[in-house]
Every structure is written in C-alpha cells, then in structure tokens.
Amino acid sequence: MRVKKSWWQSGGIRIAAAFVFLILFGGAASGIYLSQIPPEQPIAFPHKTHVALGAQCAYCHPAADWGPNAGLPSLSKCWGCHQQVQKKSPELEKLAGYVQRNEPIPWVPVAIQPDFVKFNHQPHVRAGIACETCHGPVSQMTVALPQPRQNMGWCLDCHQRMRPNDFVRLSDCATCHY
Amino acid sequence: MAEERPAKWGLVVDLDRCTGCNACIVACALENNVPFVGEDEVAYGRALYWIRTQRYWEGEYPEVTPTFQPVMCQQCGNAPCEPVCPVYASVHSEEEQINLAVYNRCVGTRYCANNCPYFARVFNWFDYELPEPMRSYLNPDVTVRRRGVMEKCTFCVQRIVRGRQKARAEGRELRDGEVQPACVQACPAEALVFGDLSDPESRVSQLARSQRRYHLLEALGTLPRVTYLKGVGNHGG
Amino acid sequence: MAVEAKPLETAVPLPHAEEDPREHLMFDPRPREVMNRMVMEAMTTTSRRYWAWVIGLALVVLVCLLGAWGNMILTGMGLAGIRRPVFWGLFIVTFVFWIGISHAGTFVSAILRVFKAEFRRPFTRAAELMTTFALAAGALYPLIHLGRVWVFYWLIPYPNARWLWPNFRSPLVWDFLAITTYLLSSTIYLYLPLVPDLAMARDRTTGWRHALYRLLALGWRGTEAEWHRLRRAITIFAFAIIPVMFSVHTIVSWDFAVGVVAGWHSTIFGPYFIIGAILSGVAAVVSILFVLRSTMLHMDYFIRKEHFDALGKLLLVFSMAWAYFFFNDYLLTWYGGEEAARRILTLHATGPAAWVWYLMLICNVVIPWLTLWNRTIRRTPWAMFIITLLINVGMYAERYTIIPLTLGHQRMPFDWGVYTPRPTEISIVIGTFALFLLLYLLASRLIPLVPVWEVQEGQMAHTLRKVGKAEVPSVTELE
C-alpha cells in the first residue's frame, strides 16, 4: 500500500530546493568574497577630482618609477598645491590641520601584498603597464578601492598573457618569493 | 629589451684563505633574517645557520691544527632535495639556476633536509620572536619565516634580483662582482668569491678552474655550484 | 592426499589420534541460528570492565593524542625530539609501523581467501577491522609530522588560484595517493562481506541498533541474486586489493629507498618492507585474536587453538622470509663497501643504540625460530600472544633502526647527531595506540565480529565420513 506523501516529501521538490539553496548560498559567499570594503582613510581623498584636473599618477606616486613602492605624497607636496588652491571643504580643513600640527597624514595602505610577496613597481612601470591594469579605474574613485581577487593566479595570468615567450622566467618562484 | 644571457651563479671557497672567523655566519644571519634560537636549542643541534664553518682537528694532541671549511647550500645542478618535495617548495630556478626555498609554499615534511647530503637545510622548530627594538634589524627584502618551514642559503637571491632589476633599468648588463651575497661581502680574507660561472672571464670562473678545485661529495653526482679550493697546508685550510 | 594440502593436520587419522577432528571449527558445526545468537550475544554484552577500558582509552586519546598534538601545532615541531640531522623520528617510525600492521587484514582476508585457506573463515573480519583502524591511526602521522599541518591540502591535486600542483615526482605524493586508495578499498572490502551479517543483526535487534543496521544492511534480503552479486563483488575485490596492498608498503619503502641517504638507498627495500609488514600484521592478528577469545563471549567456539597453530606456522615462514631479506639488504650493502653505508651498518650493530638492533634481531628472528616450530607452543594461546607482541616490538625496532639511527650518521662526520624521543612525541604515539584500541573496542560491540555466513559456508563444505571404523574428514570444493 502506498502512503500518500505530502508535497514537500517528493524528491523533485527537495532537489530543487537544495539547488536554490546552493545557488543562493554560493552567490552570497562569492559576493562576500568579491566585495572588499575599503579601509577608513584619515582624509576622504578624491582621486577622481585630481585625475580630472590632469594630475598624473606619477606626480604623487613617483617612486613607482625607481623602486618597489610607489610611495605616498609628503605633506609638503599636498600643501604645495593646496595652499594656493584654497577651496572650502571639510576635508581640506583636515589637511590644513595636519599641516599646522606638522604631523604626517596616517594614510592606510590599500593595495597591499603579503609579506612573502616581493612586488616591485619599477619593472612593471618600465614595461609600460598602466596603473589602472592592477589598481582599477582610479580616475573614477574617491578613496582608492582594493581590487578583488589579486591572487597568485592573477599575477601569473598577466605574466603569461603579456610575455608568453618569457613565461618560464616570469613564473619562476624567485620572481616574487624569497 | 635585449635577450639576456641567463646567469649561472657560483661560489668559490678558498680554504687556504679561510681563517675560521665566522664573519660570514653573522653577516648571513643578519642579511637573511635568520633567527637566533637561544643557547639551549643550539646545544641540542637546532641552530639555524645557512652557512656554517666545519672545523676539524688534524693531528694528535698537542700537535693539532684546525681546518676550517665553510659549508652552505651547494646549489646543486642535480639537487636531491628537489624531486622529493611534494609541493615544489624546493624547486630549481630557471632564472637564477639555483635551488630556491619557497617559504610560503613549504608544508614542512622535512624530506628535503633528510635527502640533502650536505645537511645545508635547517628547519624552524618554533616561532622565534625577536625582542622589540631588535625587530628593526630585520631585512625587509627577505621573508621572515614562521614555525614549521624549511630554509637554507639562497645565494642571497634578493640581492641578485635587486641587482638585475637595477642593471636592467639602467639598460646594461650586470658587472662582475656587482652582486655579492652577504657572506662574500663580509669575508675579510676574501676566501669567498661569488659571480657568474657562465662568463669565462669572471673572477669566480677563473678561480673555479684552479688546480686546487674540488666539490663536496663529488661522487654523488649532485653537480654543486660551489667549488672548494683545497688548502695546501700553510695555515690550516 | 589432496586433503592434506588443506591445513588440516588430522586429515589422516593416526592410530592414537591425540585430537578429535571435532576440535576443528569446520567439523564442529552448530545450527545457523545458534551461531547467530552467539555472535549477537557476544556483540551486545558489555561488562563494567569493558566500559572502564573505553572511558580510559578515550581519555588517553583526548589527552595524549589530541592534547599533545594540538599543543604541538600551536607551539611548533620543536616539541618533538627531532633535530638536525635526524629530521624524521618517532612519527615516521610509527607511521610505517601502523601501515605495516594494516597489511594483516588484507593478507589474511584477501590472500587466504583467494588461496582458499579454510582456517581464515572465523577471523577474516577481525583482521579486516585491524586493517581499517590501523590505517586510520597511521594516516594521522603524515599530518602530525607536517611542520605546517594547516596547509596539508596543498598535497592534494586540485585546480587552484595559485596555478600550482603537487610534485608528482615526490614519493610523499605517491604515499598520499596510495594510502587514500588503500583506506577506501579496504573499507569497502570490510563492508562487503559485512552486509549479510548486518542484515542478520538487523533482524534480531530493536531500537537504535535496529535503525543503524537497517541503514547499513542496504535492504539485504538474502535472495539468490543478491548472494550471487555479493560473491562476485567479494571475489573481484579480493583480487583487486592484493596489488593495492603490495603497492602501499612498497611506496612507503620508496620514501626511503629513492633518497640519496646512505643506508636507505637500497633496491630491495620494497619487498623487504612488505615482508616486514606482513610479519608484523599477522602477528598483530594473533595478538588481537587472543584478546578477543579471552574477553568476548562465545569466541572460544569460533577461535580455536587450530587457528593459533595455523597462524603460528605462517609467522614462522614470514619470520624466515624477513630474515632472508634482512640478510640480503645488510650483507650485500656491507659487502659493497660504500664507505658511508658501511659505517652506518657497523654503527647499527656497535653504536650507542645497538641494543635496538639486537632487540630487532632477537624479537624477529631468534624468538620465533626458537618457539614457533613447536606445535605445543603454537597451540598455547597465551604463549602465542606474548610471542606475537614481541614480534611487533621487534618490527618497531626495525623501523627505528632504519629511520633515526640511519639518519644520524650520514656522510659528513661534522653533522653526526643522536636523537632521543621527547615526551610530546611519545605521548602522541601512545595516543594513536589508544585510538586504535578504542576504535576496535567500539567496533567489537557495534558490528558482528565473526562472519557467520562464511563460517557456516565452510562448515557445510566439511563433513566427517565413516570409512570402515575410522572417521575421515572430507571437504567439498567450493565455488
């Protein structure tokens, strides 16, 4: 004798429900994984505005051309322009405050690599890689946003695409890890 | 960019010149953030050295003379440590033609250490914390290893990479002697000479052709990149 | 005479036969239902002493294994006594030991099944359980000995964001694959013949046991078609698992043999390790059978002196085979005269830890050879228990000789060093022994430990026929 099952006991419904759950769960998990929250900065620096005014990346981050770290502008570099350009805004008053107290702005680094990754800007800049390739569309950002999924496969993928003939060399462990 | 000649880094140790001063050990430890493990651990045989001076006594007391032999990773061309690592943490570098120790890949099976006939590899048995002001001594160019990771001499690969990047940015080739590992730089007697073996004119190539040359445990066929020059007995050696 | 090929010494009745053929399980049949009841009773009866052991062992596992291991993960491998140049110590020794023990089940069950050795019938399951649990205990060690166990999954081949694969040239990756295969296949091989017995238990229990056995018995009804498929599956697995078993310990031996370490680099290590594994495994089966027989109800009906006798003969043969391989490995290496290897072998026999080497020879060769030829000793269960425990002590000493004692004295005298185990690793070793015993104790009350259907099948094939005045045992060829 067959016992009448209620609708939620049928296999199809259960499998469908499991699929829906998995899709939602997977979507939520990858959403959390892919969305990275930018850290709180001492001044909400608008990259957008500065790029729109024609400032080059290397004007404020010149060390990218000769060293591993791109560097952050010193207080005097900021103030060099902004003591002339005195637009009223609360963010600029914060800058003025740092200048008055003569203390460096405690910027929070955004594009960071783990300790065991030795990244050097110089070869990348010399090879003509645009900053946006790795740092995203900075010209549309206010504060810099961390880019998701910058993992080892991402580095290798670019090395392979850009320099296929040199990939043996560029996939050497000692390129980044020592 | 011009096609570059891959370098074949090599080291020559002139045993006639080595005085056993151990400056190389200190320089190496400071350059490469090699931790200090404390007296008890050293006494138990857990000292972390990337280069060590093997001292043997020759003769019968009181007619004894010490002989010193600095031993570091021999950077074998046919390295026994490489095939046994299950995760490629011990891997041959195509770029530098040396053996790399990839700390962040190492899972700590210690198989490479057993299989190294020179026992050039050391293991981080614990996390070795430095007291606060001493943390400033750490070299930012070298990863600080944590517990459970193998490490060994890398021929100061950070200096090699940095030197090559600098030369490339200036559009020239590396000059002989431009890149030096810390031990070579610190050796007061110039017993250690480092350079590119693929360049027949480099100082290291010339020395490696000396009649006094030999390799450690040559019969094993490991093809070491470190050449020893036999001491002729003037002062130990 | 064909009868004599079977391990039934009493096939030809002697004029003054000391024993009755009915002393053999196969000639002492009882009705199926009686045997079912006996097995069920053995399974469901627990004494206070049993629970005391379970709780005690669980505490030991918790403190000595999980506690010490957890502490070691948080502090560092340095808590173990290993040091340069002895980078592998008790962990790998015990790993090899457990993998060796795990060969018993497959050997007793699969090889004896394939060769139709009838005495195997009552204890195939007990041996297979040993295989599975010894593997479970042994498979912990590759994890325990990792410096960074939290990234152990890097040994598993899977596509990942780092674009990296494990190094398939490394014996440790072979190890990983071989042990996983063996664990999976031996578990299936344990489970297959268990299904009819689980169904038997299902029909005779109530409550949570009934629910459990109903789930595990997979709806077994005992139809002819089901039996046919089960027998075919068991036959296929019995043949398939034998090469897996050989591969596992061969690959474990390659961990050493492919190395450049003097004293390890030997072509004979594969078969040498397999013989050692079977010797220690069969010895462990005897030890376990003694414990089962003396502690569980009705086990003296199923496990008899004849079984100790038969296993004792096997042990003697394997002890001789082990000695043969040992002789080949040592003598020829020594004779070869490579300086480093020769010095190590001399050191094994004369060095500060020479007692380990002599312990190995005494336990693996002297004791079995002096005792196991004797039928009375072979038929004395407690004597066999002591002998087999000693054989396993000897096999442990063998692995200890091969690993730390060899590593400590390699080619450069400057790097020589001695290794002494420290409390943490000793505690972890004790912990895995407790884990093995605990799993076995629990399983002995959860699954029917005697394959009743296999025993009955054997009993149906064996009969005593009257020829004149004498009773002659006769066997029907099965399958």
Image (cartoon, helix red, strand yellow):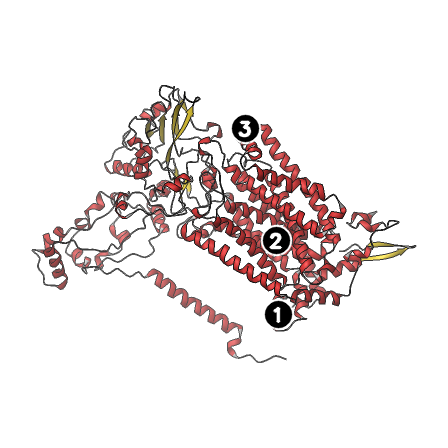
Q: In terms of depth relative to the viewer, which is nearer, C184 or C292?
A: C292
Disc 1, disc 2: CB below 8 Å?
Answer: no
Q: CA distance from mark 1 to mark 3?
A: 62 Å
Q: Which mark is residue C338?
A: 3
- Secondary element type, mark 1: helix
Residue at left offset 30%, top offset 29%: B187
Disc 1 marks which residue?
C209
Q: Position of residue B222 (x, y in %)?
A: 45, 32
Residue at image position (46%, 71%) is A17
Q: The residue under label 2 is which amino acid type?
A: Thr
Residue C348 as seen in the image, left or right of residue B98: right
Q: For mark 3, name the chain.
A: C
Quadrant including the N terminus of chain B: top left
Q: Chain of mark 2?
A: C
Mark 3 falls on what kind of element?
loop
What's the distance in space between the residues labelled 3 and 2, CA to CA? 38 Å
Give residue A84's quadrant in the image. bottom left
Identify the residue under disc 2. C131
Q: Position of residue A61 (x, y in %)?
A: 19, 49
- Quadrant of the image for the C terminus of chain B? top left
Point out the residue furthest to the right here.
C468
Please, what secondary structure does the residue beneath circle 2 have? helix
Report the amino acid beneath label 3.
Glu
Res C359 → quadrant: top right
Q: Earlier in the sequence, mark 1 or mark 2?
A: 2
Tag 1: residue type? Arg
Packing grade of label 1 (10 A; few <14, some 14-19, many >=20) is some
Measured from the top left, where is residue A74 in percent x and y? Answer: 15, 50
- Is residue A34 positioned above or below C206 on the image? above
